[in-house]
Image (cartoon, grey):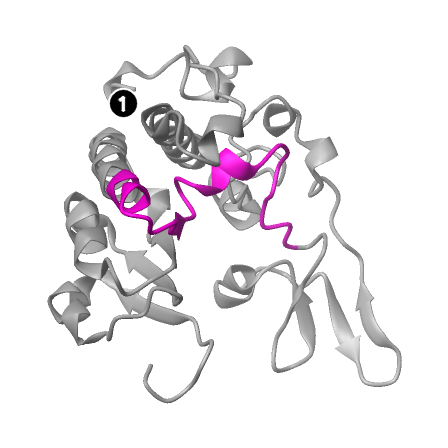
Amino acid sequence: HDVWDNVVVVVESEDRERFAELGEDWARSLILRIARRDLAYCSDMVERLVGRFGRLALHLRGIEYFGARDVAIYARELDRIAVVIRRLYEEGRPVETNVLTDRLMLSSMRNCDAGITHVTIAPDGRCYICPADCAIGHDPIGHFDAGSGLVIAPPAGLTLSRSPLCLRCDAFHCKRCVHLSRRLTGEANVPSEQQCLIAHAEREASRRLLQALGPMEPFDRLPRLPDLDYRDPLSLAGARPPDRRFGL
């Protein structure tokens, strides 16, 4: 991090005791990858990283294995992180974090769009929807030819217009990960329960953060987020009943 300018630094939750080795840089873009077993330390890790980022992206690992307890812990930690973010704004440090401040600025879905606006090309020239598909051996969607370029047949159902549940959702910051949808539900346009619950926990924490920031500029000009009486859009569609185990 002391050699290249404008580099995005990636740190792992397992290395949190070494975060102090990162020099101070309020303009740095930083990605914090969080293991499931380290969820309870999320806010502590963000606190340790204060002063070392201007934009912090939290990336949860292994969400396909998340259960009710994991989502509840994460929701609690998001509120604690929001306290840190609010303090920094009050101190004149306008930092960003993807899971809290992004939603405040969005008025429409801003998702990954793998397979729609971009594809993954493996070393052998085969094309996949995303790197995760390549890693676990999913069938390729096409190939790259040096003479004719990309030769692909994008699978149906990837676009937002083909996902009725996502169309009615306002967790605009959600990755809407097609890989996880296909892996956990068998359908590209049906999000997994874990994704919905996590995205709505983040949305709710963002809503409360916006309320707390109150009259502070520029947040005083942003539209308020409505309070929702659900945390899983699939429960509205009747696809499954609300799961009270999640306590959300």
Residue name at image x 27 percent, y 23 percent: 246
Foreground residue, 211 or 73? 211
Residue name at image x 53 percent, y 28 percent: 221
- Residue 24's quadrant in the figure? bottom left
Q: Is residue 175 left or right of residue 66?
A: right
Decide whether residue 26 is among the magenta residues. no
Residues packed near mark 1 inside 10 Å, few (<14), some (14 to 19) or many (20 plus): some
Foreground residue, 233 or 127? 233
50 is higher (above) or lower (below) than 39? below
240 is higher (above) or lower (below) than 88? above
- Residue 49's quadrant in the figure? bottom left
Whether residue 52 can be seen here: yes
Residue name at image x 62 percent, y 32 percent: 107
Decide whether residue 97 is among the magenta residues. yes
The number of callouts visible is: 1
Residue name at image x 42 percent, y 30 percent: 203
Whether residue 185 can be seen here: no
Give the dominant element type of the magenta stretch: helix, strand or loop.
loop
The secondary element bearing badge 1 is classed as: helix
Magenta region, residue range? 86-114
Residue picked out by circle 1: 246
The type of residue carrying mark 1 is Phe
Quarter of the figure that contains the N terminus: bottom left
Where residue 207 sits: x, y (%)? 40, 25
247 is higher (above) or lower (below) than 81? above
Where residue 118 sits: x, y (%)? 69, 61
- Residue 30's quadrant in the figure? bottom left
Quarter of the figure that contains the C terminus: top left
Foreground residue, 137 or 198? 198
- Specify the farthest residue to the bottom: 3
